[in-house]
Image (spheres, rainbow, N blue to C red):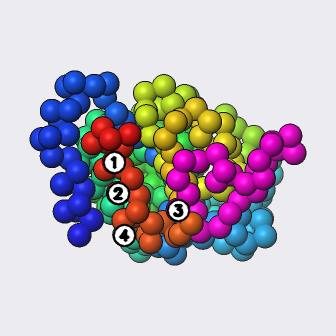
């Protein structure tokens, strides 16, 4: 059903309109709530524990310095677990959206899983890295290992160095892909935030940059700053769909249709 709806919205009439008006594009920022319905847990929902581990021990530069083997085992386990996770309906709709509006979607995700790719997406930007890759600490290049353990993949295929690590941005590190956020703000006309509380990337300043915006979240989230004049994040969005990601897709598609067809 979603596929038919999206195909309808990307017809030749919309293409003809695009020749007469500035190109409309969509910025999507997704977070852990998108993959939660596929059974991938987030530490922010479990008192600071990520799969029963202290997140600062497994996802911080200090934790990595203190015990590389412990951190490596943790990501090996997450990688093996990911192999059996399947994309949920929201992943599939977003993948179809990328296909139907090819070149007009910038999907930035905070998730390190590959469920969008399993759903068929090709152009997702992973802001915090990818679980299925490793990174060389010498040349900084990444290489794909899929669901394999880091053991047995400890030689960088680019430079031969043996010091490799998980390809996940840790607390205390810079996130190079964050530059893509500003790029998306400059070029997009509709902002959609899905399954993100704004705890890592503050979505309020992003929403302020857009006339048209959608927030999808089953819970109302309070704003982060005591100086903020509004109490809840959703107050900065044009549309607030207070549902889980999978349940919000029909309503989201209707808003996208209205925007992309040039009615807004």
Q: Choose mark 3 or mark 4, whichever is in front.
A: 3
Q: Which residue is mark 1?
A: 258
Q: In the picture shown, does residue 70 fall above or below 40? A: above
In the displayed orientation, state which residue is furthest to the left: 12
Q: Choose mark 1 or mark 3, whichever is in front.
A: 1
- Name the residue located 48 percent from the left edge and 25 percent from the top edge: 186
Query: Sequence-wise, which precedes: disc 3 or disc 2?
Result: 3
Q: Are marks 2 and 1 in contact (CB under 8 Å)?
A: yes
Q: Choose mark 4 or mark 2, whichever is in front.
A: 2
Query: Sequence-wise, which precedes: disc 1 or disc 3?
Result: 3
Say whether residue 95 is visible: yes
What is the secondary structure assignment of the residue under circle 3? Answer: strand
Q: Which residue is mark 4?
A: 89
Query: Sequence-wise, which precedes: disc 3 or disc 4?
Result: 4
Of the pair 82 and 224, the residue shown nearer to us? 224
**Quadrant position of the N terminus in the picture:** bottom left
What mark, if any, has residue 241 been given in the picture?
3
Q: Is residue 113 left or right of residue 8?
A: right
In the displayed orientation, state which residue is furthest to the front: 263
């Amino acid at each position: 059903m979603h596929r038919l709806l999206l195909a309808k919205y990307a017809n030749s009439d919309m293409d003809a309109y695009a020749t007469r008006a500035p190109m409309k594009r969509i910025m999507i920022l997704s977070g852990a709530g998108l993959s939660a319905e596929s059974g991938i847990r987030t530490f922010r929902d479990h008192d600071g524990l990520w799969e029963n581990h202290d997140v600062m021990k497994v996802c911080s530069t200090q934790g990595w310095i203190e015990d590389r083997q412990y951190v490596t085992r943790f990501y090996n386990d997450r990688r093996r677990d990911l192999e059996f996770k399947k994309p949920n309906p929201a992943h599939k709709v977003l993948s179809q959206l990328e296909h139907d509006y090819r070149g007009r979607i910038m999907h930035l995700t905070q998730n390190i899983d590959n469920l969008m790719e399993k759903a068929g997406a090709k152009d997702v930007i992973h802001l915090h890295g990818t679980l299925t890759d490793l990174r060389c600490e010498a040349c900084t290049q990444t290489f794909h290992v899929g669901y394999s353990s880091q053991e047995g993949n400890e030689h960088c295929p680019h430079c031969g160095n043996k010091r490799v690590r998980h390809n996940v941005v840790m607390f205390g590190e810079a996130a190079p892909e964050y530059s893509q956020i500003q790029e998306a703000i400059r070029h997009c006309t509709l902002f959609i935030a899905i399954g993100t509380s704004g705890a890592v990337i503050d979505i309020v300043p992003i929403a302020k940059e857009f006339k048209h915006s959608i927030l999808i979240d089953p819970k109302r989230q309070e704003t982060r700053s005591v100086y903020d004049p509004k109490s809840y994040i959703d107050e900065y969005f044009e549309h607030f769909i207070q549902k889980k990601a999978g349940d919000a897709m029909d309503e989201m598609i209707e808003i996208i249709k209205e925007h992309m067809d040039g009615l807004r």
